[in-house]
Amino acid sequence: MQYELDTSTSPSANKSDCLIVAVFSKNNKANLGDAAKELDKQSKGALSEITKSGDFDGSLEQTQLLYKLDGVATSRVLMVGCGEKKSFDTVALNKAMKAASKALKSSKIKDLCIYLTDSYKNKEQLNALTQIVIAQADTNYQLLDYKSESKDETTLRKVSLGLADFDKLDKSDLSKAIKNGAAIAKGMSLAKDLANHPGNVCTPTYIAEQADVVANDYANISIDILEEKDMAKLGMGSFLSVSKGSDEPGKMIILEYKGAKDKDQAPIALVGKGITFDTGGISLKPGASMDEMKFDMGGAAGMLGTLKACAEMKLPINLVVVLAAAENMPSARASKPGDIVTSMSGKTIEVLNTDAEGRLVLCDALTYVGKYNPEVVIDAATLTGACIIALGHHICAVLSNDDGLASDIMNAGNTINDRAWQLPMGDDYKKQLKSSFADLGNIGGRAAGTITAACFLGEFTKDYKWAHLDIAGTAWEGKDATGRPVPLLSQYLINKASA
């Protein structure tokens, strides 16, 4: 998809196949946005006639498609309800854009121009443009690899973003905001593709192959892949205790992005849980919805997607991305509850539940990444069902050994509409991980499951600033991957690059 800035000051003269314009709600009555007002004037009240009927009041996500208005160059105008203007934040913008995209899915249009930034002023418009591109691309994403008869009937090839008062901002800044949105959208698409593929396709080997494709696409990305024999030499007994139960060999995939002028600048490290299918192992999960456990590699998918977005934006930073990819299966070789394993750090772990396997692969990855002397380390994992109980499917959890880092992550999430909420950590919770026979157990009981899981990881992250994102509630919705936390982490990296 091609995304670009449209600097036309007259929406009525815009010759795109369709224009999307904002209509706000004020006192339960429609209030036309700037672009809509201009179209209404040129069409001698065609839009206001719709609003006066009372059928369209500008409520958030409301849509109305109009055809061939007099005095207007385009053949279609889509009015989109944006709710109250004073409440038109990033969340509302995202909903309005997605509603508009859904309304146009069956339309045979080749190019589209969007005017939805009427209520944003100056630099706020930059973030709004990025948001619009992400939402538009997200809504139009589809994976058709396994549909024998379905074909991609999308005719849309170009999306323009219009601003009536573009002269108030530098055009290069506006174009950059759009390019950032397109880059993040590409990263999300990659993450969604990986997660949506079934477990018999997206294996640890497949993730390694796709990571290699990303590395080959960009000159400043290098890749190294640790096989199980390499991990055994490094003492990664915790990781191997998970992968040994499967015929699919585990992979530790390391990618380095050198974007900073100083190639020796301390990198930001991103670590992703990549359990390509999670049966629970010997602690077998219930059968209902087990098909969704193909999404248990959402952390790794998100980190690889974030790397792609970063490379597309050419951010002047250094990154290390580690993907801990394995399959958790029950077999004669699988770990048993009560087994004790030794991690790369030397700490021993009593495996009290084999379904708490994500932390077992992550702890060795978090120890390994310390060799790069990173500025900060952020891991992402579909780690605990307890996180869904706590925060639902809208906000991910962030837990950290540094409140400043947690705050930076939450601020980035608020900016890009991929929100995170900080949960506490402390010694009282660590006590729940006590083991009678090893240094620690891999579960801490039913209470505060998300927190105790993070406390487990915290035992392996004491040498650097670290934050953990539990994305169990946000990595997929229904039966579809969301591409999160690519927007959140991309915005965090943008902020770091511009600091």
Image: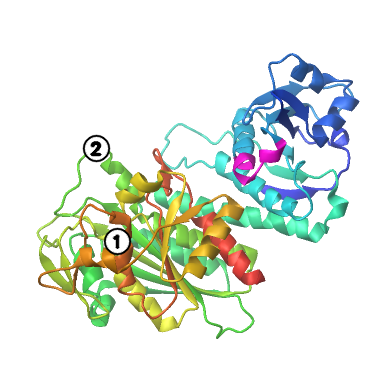
For the point 79% across and 53% down, the residue is 122
Residue 381 figure quarter: bottom left
- In the image, taking residue 329 as reference, residue 153 lies left or right, namely right
In the depicted view, which residue is nearer to us: 138 or 489? Answer: 489
Q: Which of the two labelled residues, at mark 1 and mark 2, occupies the earlier sequence position? A: 2
Three-letter amino acid code at disc 2?
Ala
Whether the magenta-drawn stretch holds residue 89 is answered as yes
On-image quarter of the C terminus: bottom right
* Residue at 84% from the left image edge and 36% from the top image edge: 11
Q: Which mark is residue 306?
A: none
Asked if residue 97 is positioned above or below residue 301 in the image, the reply reads above
Check disc 1 and report the residue beneath it.
Answer: 453
Q: Position of residue 53 (x, y in %)?
A: 74, 13
- The residue range painted magenta reads 85-94
Is 17 displayed left or right of 406 in the figure? right
Residue 290 rendering spot, x and y as whole percentages: 26, 43
For mark 2, give the secondary structure.
loop
Picture quarter containing residue 56? top right
In this rendering, would 259 be left or right of 302? Answer: right
Secondary structure of the magenta portion, mostly?
Answer: helix
Q: Position of residue 367 (x, y in %)?
A: 33, 77
Residue that numbered label 2 is attached to: 288
Residue 250 visible? The answer is no
168 to the left or right of 352: right
Q: Residues within 10 Å of mark 1 (few under 14, many from 20)?
A: many
Amino acid found under the numbered disc labelled 1: Ala
Foreground mark, 1 or 2, reads 1
Q: Quadrant of residue 66?
A: top right
